Image (cartoon, rainbow, N blue to C red):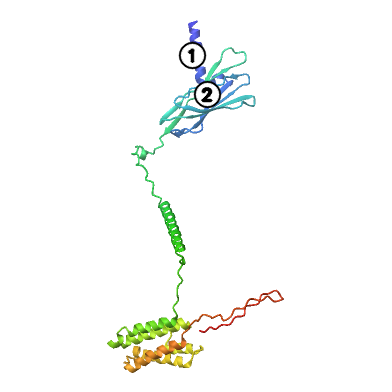
Amino acid sequence: MRRIGWKIGALMLIIGALGVRAQSGLIEIEARVDKNVITIGDRITYTITIRHAPNVRVENPGPGVNLGMFEIKDYQIHEPVETDGIIQETFEYVISVYDTGRFVIPPFPVAFFASDTTPHPQIITSDPVEIYVESVLKSADAELKDIKPPLTIPVDYRRWVMLGLIGLLAILLLGGGYYYYRKRQRGEPIFRKEVIQPAHEIAYSEIEQLLNSGLMSCGEWKTFFTLLSDILRRYVENRFFVPAMEDTTSELMYALREMNIETAALDNLEKTLELCDLVKFARYEPVAKEVDRAIQQARNFIEATKLEFQAVEVLEKVDAEIPENGRQAAPKTSGKGNF
């Protein structure tokens, strides 16, 4: 009896080791993974496929199987599929491991009943599967590096510039409001009106400054007549709006003769500018009488061509009359004004 028991036990071990071949076509099991080389933490799909005859009943392995060092992250059972009289059952496990090196998924055991009348289950196992787990660090970076210092956040200067502009605008608004308030309290105008000085007044003032400059007493005639020429040319530009500073004397006189200017005034200007040109370019030294005459001619030209405004004096005021056509008649006034 002991010999018979020993033989039966050995036969069962052979059946368990041979798996597919042990059942002579009744059942077979296949284990595979989607990839054999992974890095730490990668997830792989471990699939168990069981094919058996229709009269064989397979026990559901469930999620609690032993897969060695691997952790089961997910578990799925597919519906059985029958093809050519063979039933195929598939079980999928999503697994992972957190170490490096060579790992082996041990043989996967499945219990089955050879027929509906078989009282005790039998065990069939899959082949082991090798998995190689590599480090996420390359060989050159195998050693861990020191922790980097905290990252310095750059200063956002745009924010400070914006705040500064807002503050400056607020100060300007407050200052402007205070200025307006003080002006209104004193009854003063907010903005001062710019008084435009007439061209002839500017020319008269510049001639007086030239006479008081001391150039005549020093005999600096070239400088004196250069300044006198510039005074007259600036006056012509401001009074008649011609480019007198850029034109020659002949060009300037030609342009002025096209205007409605008295001939005597133009003669005074032309004689003065010609004397200025002689002194400036020909090194002519005028006598005192010529200097006095040139200054007087310049004044005469300015006096003859100056532009003055005089306020209109209202002599009478006539109430507006509304004619029969419904339009208001213009008031009848009389006055005078000259330039």
Of circles 2 and 1, the one toward us is: 2
Q: What's the amino acid at mark 2?
A: Pro
Q: Residue at x 37, y 82 (%)?
A: 206
**Residue of label 2:** 63
Which x, y percent locates residue 211? Answer: 33, 85
The secondary structure type at the circle numbered 1 is helix
In the foreground, 158 or 285: 285
Q: Can you tell which mark lies on residue 249?
A: none
Which x, y percent locates residue 191? Answer: 46, 67
Q: What's the amino acid at mark 1?
A: Ala
Q: Is residue 156 left or right of residue 328?
A: left
Please say whether residue 251 is visible from this viewpoint: no
Q: How crowded is mark 2: few (under 14 residues within 10 Å), some or many (20 or more)?
A: some
Q: Residue at x 48, y 10 (%)?
A: 6
Residue closest to the far left: 218
Up/down of 279 relative to 189, above or below: below
Q: Is residue 330 left or right of residue 292?
A: right
Q: In which quarter of the image is residue 134?
A: top left
Up/down of 213 relative to 48, above or below: below
Residue closest to the far top: 1
Label 2 to label 1: alpha-carbon separation:
30 Å
Up/down of 196 relative to 289, above or below: above
**Residue of label 1:** 10
Residue closest to the far right: 324
Q: In this view, does 22 lie to the left or right of 283?
A: right
